[in-house]
Amino acid sequence: MRSDSIRVVGTGNGGSHAWNLVKIDSAWYNLDATWDDPVPDQKGRISYAYFNVPDSLMQKNHVWNVIDYPAAMTQSYIFMSDMNNAVISGGYFFYSSNDDNDRLYKMRLNGTDKIKVLSDRAPYFAIYGDLIYYSNYSQGGYLFKVNKDGTGREKLNNKLSIVESINEGVLYYKDAASGNILTLTIGSTNTLQRIDITAPASKLIYNIGEKLDVTGLVVTGTYSDGSTKVESITAENVTGFNSTVTATDQVLTITDGAKTTTFRVQISDFPANLNVPPDKEWRITFSQPVDANTLQNNIVIRRTDVIFIKEDSFSITPVLDTNNSKVVIVNHSTPFVVGATYELSVNVGIKDTSGKSLSKPSGLSFKTIVQ
């Protein structure tokens, strides 16, 4: 990604003001960091009302000589202009809404699936696990907590409180009357230090248009006291998946609280399901003579209609055709299960005899039928 920046001079709400035009890839956007930083300073509170927005939004309260500057027309980030005090949790932005008087909303990181979480005004909040702690400005600014799905709302005190942060299981908030910073222990100080994938997802190769499937994925968290536990991970914890185009090495990120780890998938343009007999012998023709030493583990047949299947249960043995080094024969000593669905994958680790790798993965899905 390439970016450039230009300083824009004009007025904001009638007073002298300056902001930036930023170029991301080939598109220009307005960025007013001054107006997105509240005055007086409010620790931890940042607005995105003027973050990478088009001219049409800026012109509501900014004036400048537009002919002197590049036009900013793209609206790729305009969904962020509704955000105050945004926090990322479980694959979502949680934020106080500029458009709805600081009521709490969430949306996916790509700007879709916008949902109101809470009808209370919550200009200050923090997230700990599955709970949101917030200053309820619909009820005296008192300290409240609520589940991330908006259920289980509970009042915690009877004073105007400004939530600042959560650290090591301790909530820090300001008593507005005295200005003092107070604390509330809300959880164990045994905190998550890292997450690791201890079992991969069963499905790592996808067809164009398929949905992400995290079946079989096991993520283990390591905590500050040295203990470990399996974390609760769903598709909502995973970002970066895009099955609209082919990809040989697409990196997906798993987020659990503030911790992340990654894994990789392939996106292939597989043909539609084929019906084949259970003793089907596959013959794969390449455009160039194939290096036989690169076949093993780069041609895989995997059953896709069950969660777990041992690949060696049907002893896959890809070999070159003795009469044509461009043709690979895939043998299996055990017949395929009648009525089952499989996926044959050809990975980019295969090389031709000159050492050049396959340009992209390929393959097909098939179902076995009675002959």
Image: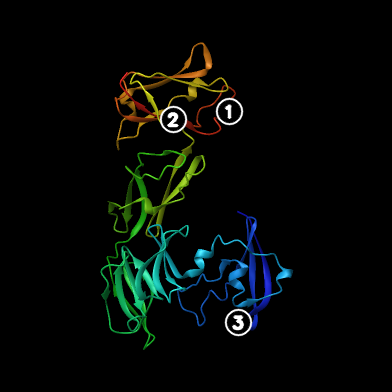
Q: Nearer the viewer, residue 196 or 132?
A: 132
Q: Which residue carries the number 1 mark?
A: 356
The answer to whether residue 346 shows anywhere in this view is: no
Q: Is tag 3's residue or tag 2's residue first in the polypeptide sequence?
A: 3
Q: Is tag 3's residue or tag 1's residue first in the polypeptide sequence?
A: 3
In the image, residue 64 sits, relative to residue 247, either above or below, namely below
Q: Residue 18: where, in percent of width, then height? A: 65, 76
Q: Secondary structure at mark 3?
A: loop
State how far apart marks 3 and 2 are (Cα).
60 Å
Residue 13, numbered circle: 3
In the image, residue 177 sits, relative to residue 311, either above or below, namely below
Name the residue rendered at 50%, 64% in the picture.
79
Residue extending farthest bottom: 177
Q: Residue 327: where, in percent of width, then height? A: 50, 18
Q: Nearer the viewer, residue 319 or 282?
A: 282
Q: Secondary structure at mark 2?
A: strand
Q: Which residue carries the number 2 mark?
A: 364
State how far apart marks 1 and 2 are (Cα).
23 Å
Q: Residue 95: where, in percent of width, then height? A: 42, 68
